[in-house]
Image: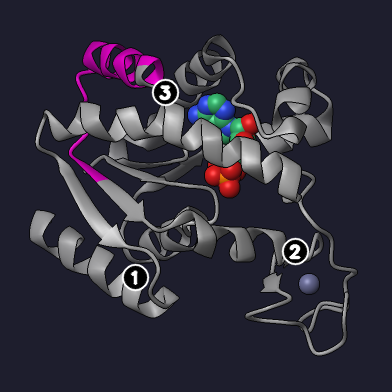
Amino acid sequence: MNLLIIGAPGAGKGTVSDRIINDYELVHVSTGDMLREAVKNGTPVGLQAQGYMNRGELVPDEVIHDIIVERLSRDDVDAGFLFDGYPRTKNQAVDLDEILKQLDKKVDCVIDLDIDDEDLIKRITGRRLCPDCGEIYNIYYKPSKTEGICDKCGGTLIQRKDDNPDSLKVRLEEYHKNTQPVIEYYEKMDIVRHVDASMSKDEVYDSVKNILEGLY
Ligand code: ADP
Ligand code: ZN
């Protein structure tokens, strides 16, 4: 089973993906995580990507193409994969089809996490993360007990560089302009399932799980 998860920034792609991975044997491939890792390590891809990412713009398709081809060359993806945050442009979607055809694979289902921009803004600008253990907080919805300190491990909470109002505005524009057409592209293949992502994490995951149970 090969899945894609699509949604605006803050829709909850990361949370849903973690739960799917926990329950199903799929390899989680997040281009956002891969790019952040590359930036942290100062690799050539990271150096190319970091300016775009900080501004909230999409990283060029060629850069993404290379990291996807590299990732799909590893054997672990034969068990099935979950792509999170990719494809994000119609061009990437067409490209992915070609890459997969060569590998005798295809996309089986696209999960679209649907949510209004207003909800996203609070989720994103309030988001804080612990760099040490990965725990995610939100100053509005899920504050840590002591401001700025991780409840789990005592780490100092940080904000993602692109979780500021200016970058978020660009990310939302990019989403509507470039990623909405990706959903339409897969609609034509009749493999998209929409989920209301404004509900609680548990409710969202219940809907996703219902969809997946129907596929397996
Ligand atoms: P979010 O969906 O919350 O913006 P991601 O972690 O998915 O977070 O992506 C963060 C940033 O990484 C994006 O704003 C963009 O700059 C870059 N990025 C991630 N995936 C892609 C992709 N498939 N194509 C182009 N840029 C990407
Ligand atoms: Zn922590």
Amino acid identity at mark 1:
Val
Q: What's the mark number on residue 89?
A: 3
Left or right, 126 with respect to 69, comes to right
Towards the viewer: 3 or 75: 3
Q: Secondary structure at mark 1?
A: helix
Q: Residue at x 75, y 64 (%)?
A: 129
Q: Identify the residue position indicated by label 1 in the image.
A: 204
Amino acid identity at mark 2:
Leu
Percent from the top left, x then y, of residue 33? Answer: 62, 42
- Per the model, the C-alpha gap separating discs 2 and 1 is 21 Å
Q: Is mark 3 within 8 Å of ligand 1?
A: yes
Left or right, 60 with respect to 215, comes to right
Q: Secondary structure at mark 2?
A: strand
Q: Quadrant of residue 62?
A: top right
- Per the model, the C-alpha gap separating discs 2 and 3 is 27 Å
Q: Is mark 2 within 8 Å of ligand 2?
A: no
Q: Earlier in the sequence, mark 2 or mark 1?
A: 2
For the record, the magenta segment spans 91-110
In this orientation, does residue 86 appear? no
Q: Identify the residue position indicated by label 2 in the image.
A: 129
| Mark 1 closeness class: few <14, some 14–19, many ≥20 residues within 10 Å | some
Q: Secondary structure at mark 3?
A: loop
Q: Quadrant of residue 57?
A: top right
Percent from the top left, x then y, of residue 43? Answer: 78, 21
In the image, residue 64 lies in the stretch drawn in magenta: no
